[in-house]
Amino acid sequence: MATDRILSSKARTPEEEQANVALRPAALSEYTGQRELIERLSIAMQAAKVRGEPLEHLLLHGPPGLGKTTLAHVVSKEMGTRLVLESGPALARGTDLVAALRGLSKGDVLFIDEIHRMPVAVEEFIYPAMEDFRVDVRVDSGIHATTVHLPLQAFTLIGATTRAGLLSGPLRSRFGLVHHLRYYDEAELTTILIRSASLLRAPAEAAALTRIARRSRGTPRIANRLLRRVRDFALVRAGGQITPEVVDAALTLEGVDDMGLDELDRSYIKALGTTYRGGPAGLETIAATMNEDPGTLEDVVEPYLLQIGYLARTRRGRALTRAAVDKLGAALGLQYNPEAFGGGGGLFEG
């Protein structure tokens, strides 16, 4: 399936997630990237320690694989408290959340991943918990109904979401710190890979790690996954040494080109460029041509193509940019048609 591909920004298996745990930084000083967030967090945590209070509630939003869960682990370790992990979809009833909240000790960090998927009935329980450190439990029903106020230990809630727009206004307003995680640049990913290669005991040249970083779509999780694939290839085919040539050979075998595009990305670009002359074309139409799910293309393929400037979303649909055909035209059989601009025709000649 497309969502299981090597360039997916989501963890593909529990085993992979466990492997990622071993590569996580243990302290804020080891965390690479997100400089503005790290500076804000450092100040907030130092102030909270001086006051003897928990850190303010923190909301992290951004694409998957950028380190939201990792930051929750780092915050917990820096504050010297326990981290409790929950998932928004798993909190199906209010009692599920109450059980998690009542188990917290003073200063503990409750991390809720995909918090926007928390049911409304559960969300209502969290408002008094965040503001007044209590939960209100309704006992009985009808005219005999009463509400019991259960006190909680002061805690920190860290919410993570990939869809900040789906978060309700009342919930969002209760977070003291809100930050968007951006994609990482090549230098930051190279720094992360140098540390990961050391932890994996994989001898690697700096130039080789830079080539992996260039193909990692700005995402640390993808960078570490590619590093593990290259490490395995180097162990079997190159005596364990990771060189630029080994990286090229290993990732060519995986179908990943020097821009971090795989077969699904190239198929999308080719379908839009040849069948629809570069666009604009609707997402459903492109998906039908490719025999793919529209949601997969929108969530898995398009974000990176937009990020690198190969795709434009217009009111009339999706369209390829000049940069896309300049880079991939020869390989995919696309030819730029300058006379099409300003007219009613497509952008490219197939």
Image: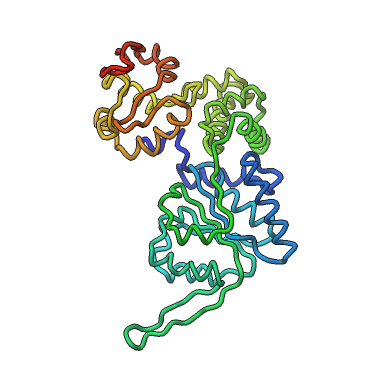
**Residue at the right extreme, as displayed:** 50
Residue at position x 64%, y 54% in the image: 75
Q: Position of residue 209 (x, y in %)?
A: 62, 27
Q: Position of residue 121 (x, y in %)?
A: 38, 67
In screen coordinates, is 10 left or right of 224?
Answer: left
**Residue at the bottom extreme, as displayed:** 144
Q: Nearer the viewer, residue 64 or 194?
A: 64
The part of the image, by quadrant, that contains residue 290 is: top left
Q: Eyeballing the image, is 15 above or below 241?
A: below
Q: Nearer the viewer, residue 280 or 206?
A: 280
Q: Eyeballing the image, is 273 above or below 163?
A: above
Figure quadrant of the C terminus: top left
Q: Eyeballing the image, is 268 above or below 49?
A: above
Q: Eyeballing the image, is 207 above or below 196?
A: above
Figure quadrant of the N terminus: top left
Residue at position x 62%, y 21% in the image: 243
